Structures are given as structure tokens and as C-alpha cells.
Amino acid sequence: MSEFKDRFYDSYYTTHIVGRKGKVTLESFRAHARVYDALWAPALPADTSARILDAGCGSGSLVWWLQQRGYTNAGGIDVSDEQVGIARALGVRGVERADLHRYLAEHPCGFDRVILRDVLEHFSRERILEVLDLCRRALRPDGALVIQVPNAEAPLWGRIRYGDFTHEMAFTGGALKQLFGVTGYGHVEFHPAGPVLGGMRDLPRHLLWKCVQSVYRMLVFAETGRRGVIVTEGIIAVARPLPLGRDPG
């Protein structure tokens, strides 16, 4: 990680997270649980003893949610001492401060799921290739990589891409397919990262989003002929490693 990013990550929680989302508490974890139930539960293994790593876990909300769902071997790593400290203070188990590259390299065939939620956009293109290669080696043969990244095909994609000074890029579904193909993954699935209807209070906004989504998809179809484009600010992808030595194509 570059020196300028180290400077940002040293105080990432206080200078970025708190200003955007407020202080992290168990109540905020519980509030996010319904979102995780809707967006992330389908990517989980049925076996609750599966080893799951949230690489770049931040303050630990996703790890906490996994543990609440009974995944006893779910843990996380993050480069920020500050964020790891918050996670531990809130009682999240199995969270430690570690360099992502080194940690993955030290755990070959160690995990059934590796999660990179809002992580890849922090790296340069060359480093992204390295990270995905390391994730592939860290996954068991029947495991899967689950990522969430900024979606460059969203109407307001720049809000996420440029909303964090440490972000390097955004992605499209096409670029992700290309990236997974080069790094040895197959059977890729894409899903929108929200929004999630949490109750009647959210209904007007949810209905408005449905209208906006339809209009934007219509514009994409009019120009390119493509249907069903994912246009949420984030895009979730699930990819499974191909056997070593097998041609990704």
C-alpha cells in the first residue's frame, strides 16, 4: 500500500466512515442485517461450519452478521488498526489487523468463501490482478469469491468512485467478466447491490428507484440493444475458481 493511502487508512474510521454513516454501533450492525440478508445470504454456503474470510472487513459489520447467522468460522482482516479496534470493542470475533496480500498468501486452500466488499476499487489495476490471483489460491476447490465494487454503469456511479479519496476505479459487468477470465474464475453471477425495501417508510423511495431504473435501462437498450443491465451504484459478483491449469476461456 502506498504511503499516502497509509496516511488515510490510519484514521479511516474517524475521517471517512463517521462522516458518511455516523458512529458504528451494535444498533447500526442490526440495522444493516436486513440488507445483508437480502444481498449476501444467497452467496453463502449451506454449511455453517464453512471457513469464510471477509478481507477488508472494516469495522466488522459483515463478520458480525455472519456470526449471528451461525457461521462459527467466519472472520475478517483489515489494514486499519482503528477499524479493527472498533470491531473488537463491539465483540466481533476473529477480526485481526493484517495485510491482505500477505494473509492470503499464507492461507492456501484455506477458505470456502473469500469476500471483498468495497475493496478492489482501492487498488491499482496491477494490484487487482495480484489480489484475485491470491484469492483463487486461498479458496478451496469448491469455494467462491464474492465481491462488491462500484458500478460504472450506474447513473450516479461517480458518487461512489470519487466519494473516497483512496478509490482508484469503478467497474462494469463486462470488465469484471474480462478480469475474472484472465485470473482463472468461471461460473460468474452478477447481482445488484440494493436497494433493499426495509419497510413502509422506504416504499416511496423504492418505487421511485424502480421508475428511474426502468428509464435508465431503456436508455441503455436504445443505444446498445442490451437488456437487463445492472444500474445500482454497486454490483455484487460471485465467481468460482477454475481448476488450476484449466483454460479460463
Image: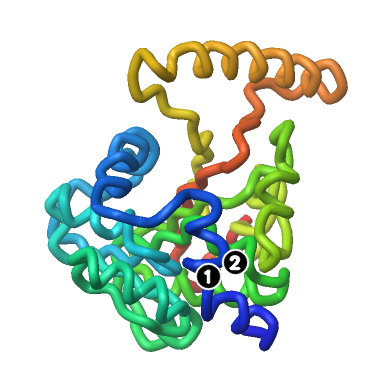
| Quadrant placement of the C terminus | bottom right
Q: In the picture, which quadrant includes the N terminus?
A: bottom right
Q: Is residue 176 left or right of residue 54?
A: right
How busy is the neighbourhood of tag 2: few (under 14 within 10 Å), some, or many (20 plus)?
A: many
User: Marks 2 and 1: CB-CB under 8 Å?
Assistant: no
Where residue 44 sits in the image (x, y, percent)?
Answer: 29, 48
Q: Residue at x 42, y 65 (%)?
A: 58
Residue type pointed to by label 2: Thr
Name the residue furthest right: 223
**Secondary structure state at the residue bearing disc 2:** loop
- Total residue callouts: 2
Q: Which mark is residue 183?
A: 2
Q: Is residue 138 left or right of residue 178?
A: left
Is residue 91 rendered to the left or right of residue 5?
left
Alpha carbon separation for disc pair 2 and 1 = 30 Å
Choose top left, top right, bottom left or bottom right for residue 182. bottom right
Disc 1 designates what residue? 12
Circle 1 SS class: helix
Which amino acid is tagged 1?
Tyr
At horizontal 70% and vertical 44% (from top left) the residue drawn is 159
